[in-house]
Amino acid sequence: MLKSLSLENFTVFPEVELNFGKNLNVIIGENGAGKTHILKAAYSAIAVSAARAKDGATEVPSKAQIQSALAEKLLTVFRPDGLGRLVRRARGRSKCRLSYRFDRRELNLTFTFSTVARTEVTVEVMPTTREKNLPVFLPTRELLTIAPGFVALYETTHLSFEETWRDTCILLEAPLARGPREKNIKNLLVPLEAAMGGKVEVDRAGRFYLHVDSGSMEMHLVAEGLRKLAMVARLIATGSLLDKGYLFWDEPESNLNPRIIKTLARTIMQVAKSGIQVFIGTHSLFLLRELHILQTQEYLGVRHALLRAPF
């Protein structure tokens, strides 16, 4: 569990420390306040910590390996011209510091980089082990319609898409989970499938469909709001959003009918209750109201952080 994130001179933040709860964390703010930057900063570090051997990671990370991986992840997730462009704008040379504190102290991490940095960070507090659970990042756009073939294209050509898209597409294409977890998966999927009016299926070519009573509908033909629910349903079915781990979701309410926001809020709360630490960035009063109602009914701890734009 990520307990706190401290940002100093990072993008729009002169200095901020955010303390998180173990269930659901809601970051509220107007456009330009930095909600997405907080989600991406937290996701990037956890994704690096959770890197697997197939990605060139060792079980016990080395300082050089962590520094290189952090720099690369920040560059591919934020897409700046150079790493130093993420340092808060100020006269003269400056540097930023990002500090992460976890419930497992061996995961704690602090690193810095300056305005002149291109691809280098300096680690001050070094983790001594790796995070066991891969984080999930859901952007404002749904990804089921672009997932088939996207990962191969991303890894063999120069695309100007954030690497969060690639990471999430890999998880969407994972096989379905089996075994004792299936009961929990079914419980989470029932309300989602009821809201969508069907179940998510994938063919041999990796294309996604929504299977309804009258047959299967190509995911491109499904309303985008329902596709976002379908994306969550698929990640639950593969086990990526089950029991343990992290979910970062940027404006989950975008392109959703207000009627479906109730189902969305219930899904977010159920995922948080299942053991996933959830972080969402939003400025939707509809979603906040529904989360507050559910929090009151179910007594699930929800921590809020209110951000204000720096202008």
Image (cartoon, grey):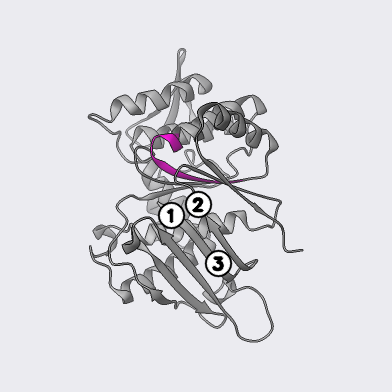
Q: Position of residue 48 (x, y in %)?
A: 37, 62
Which sits earlier in the primary sequence, circle 1 or circle 3?
1
When the figure is inspected, residue 289 is found, relative to residue 283, above or below; the finding is above
Which residue position holds label 2?
20
Towards the viewer: 191 or 2: 2
> At x 47% / y 36%, what residue is drawn?
231
Which residue position holds label 3?
7
Q: Amino acid at mark 3?
A: Leu
Which sits earlier in the primary sequence, circle 2 or circle 3?
3
Q: Position of residue 121 (x, y in %)?
A: 44, 76
Which residue position holds label 1?
2
**Would you say residue 150 is visible in this rendering?**
no
Q: Which mark is residue 15?
A: none
In what element is the residue under mark 3? strand
Classify 10 Å Cα crowding around label 2: few (below 14), some (14-19), many (20 and above).
many
Taking the view exactly as shown, the residue that stands out farthest to the bottom is 92
